[in-house]
Image (tube, helix red, strand yellow):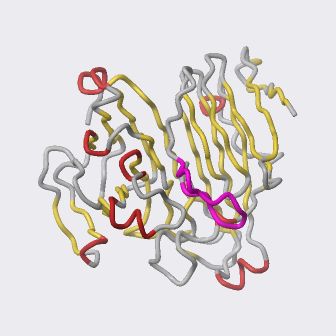
Amino acid sequence: MLVFHKMEHSAGEWQHRAAIEITKDWNGVEQVVLQNQQGASARVSLLGGQVTSWRNKHGEELLFTSSKAIFQPPKAMRGGIPICFPQFGNCGSLEKHGFARNKVWAIDDNPEMRQPNDSNGKSFIDLLLKPSEDDLKCWPHSFEFRLRVSLATNGDLNLTSRVRNVNGKPFSFSFAYHTYFSVSDISEVRIEGLETLDYLDNLCERQRFTEQGDAITFESEVSRLYLSSPNVVAVLDHEKKRTYVIRKEGLPDVVVWNPWEKKSKSMVDFGDEEYKQMLCVDGAAIEKPITLKPGKEWTGRLQLSVVPSSFCSEHLDL
């Protein structure tokens, strides 16, 4: 089904029409394909509200998905951008990374997000998650989670999450956009923007350390939570001569993860050598959980761009 969105705002009628295709995957789960006029695209599964593909105008896939990923609901797929909510990792009583990534979301027919600057010229979809009775048994808090995924005219991928407390009492949660970037060779990749920051090392019982390098490079397993991070972080892929630029709001932490060789062999839904072609760099709110009072709302935004690496060093304020 091909849907053309044309909406109005106070400044007048848009000049853009954004094409959205709604299909079903081989498990019968609906997925939404966003496209722009230049040929870039993004695919979003209603299972987990998970972005499963993001391609540039040349058709190159920018997100990693394991060749051994298990596409079987309710298990989340290994790759893309899983939504970790209301818990990240095993830091709580819920299933790993929380339940949002394993639930079927609804298309939000009455989204509250109408800001022109978030929508104009973009192809976008609004999704909604509310807790089921089973969810409330394991996490007794009523919420509305609204997710907008949009593809800009320049190919940027934008995710905006809004969590509202519709409960009668406060609740706290942690959150992450668990982004799997596709890279050419992990040994040729570096991250800039996290220098001198403190981080919690999950390989050392979450001990706190300070980053000493000029940039983060990879030669073994890494599982870290960088604290009080800047709102712009860059992942430079030397072999491809391209840079992923991560811009974020409301997400003070950054998770950096690569399982390396030994850990890769222990994961059933991950190829033994695939650690060389991926890197997770997540905008997150984990160290200090978000606390929402009744009726209040939290917003976390992520913008992903791809630029030539030469452009990055000259024009980005890292």
Our reading of the magenta stretch's main secondary structure is loop
Q: Is residue 73 magenta?
A: yes
**What is the quadrant of residue 313 in the picture?**
top left
Whether residue 114 is visible to the viewer of this picture, yes or no, is yes
User: If the image is split into quadrants, where does the N terminus sit?
Assistant: top right
Q: Say above or below: 60 vs 74.
A: above
Q: Is residue 287 left or right of residue 18?
A: left
State how many labels appear.
0
Quadrant of the image occupied by residue 241: top left
Q: Is residue 243 above or below residue 48?
A: above
Say if the magenta span includes residue 40.
no
Name the residue at 48% across, 50% down.
179
Question: Could you tell me residue 286's position as x and y percent?
Answer: 42, 66
Point out the image quarter for the C terminus.
top left
Q: Residue at x 78, y 25 (%)?
A: 8
First to last magenta residue range: 65-78
In the rendered image, the vertical position of residue 132 relative to residue 104, given as above or below: below
The percent position of residue 265, horizontal first and vertical second, equals 41, 65
- In the displayed structure, would residue 126 be above or below residue 170? above
Rendering coords of residue 214 (x, y %)? 14, 44
Residue situated furthest top in the rendering: 15
Q: Is residue 89 left or right of residue 129?
A: left
- Residue nearer the viewer, 5 or 41: 41
State the residue at coordinates (25%, 49%).
Answer: 194
Q: Is residue 253 visible?
A: no
In percent of width and height, residue 270 lies at 49, 59
Q: Residue at x 53, y 74 (%)?
A: 96
150 relative to 280 in the view: left or right: right
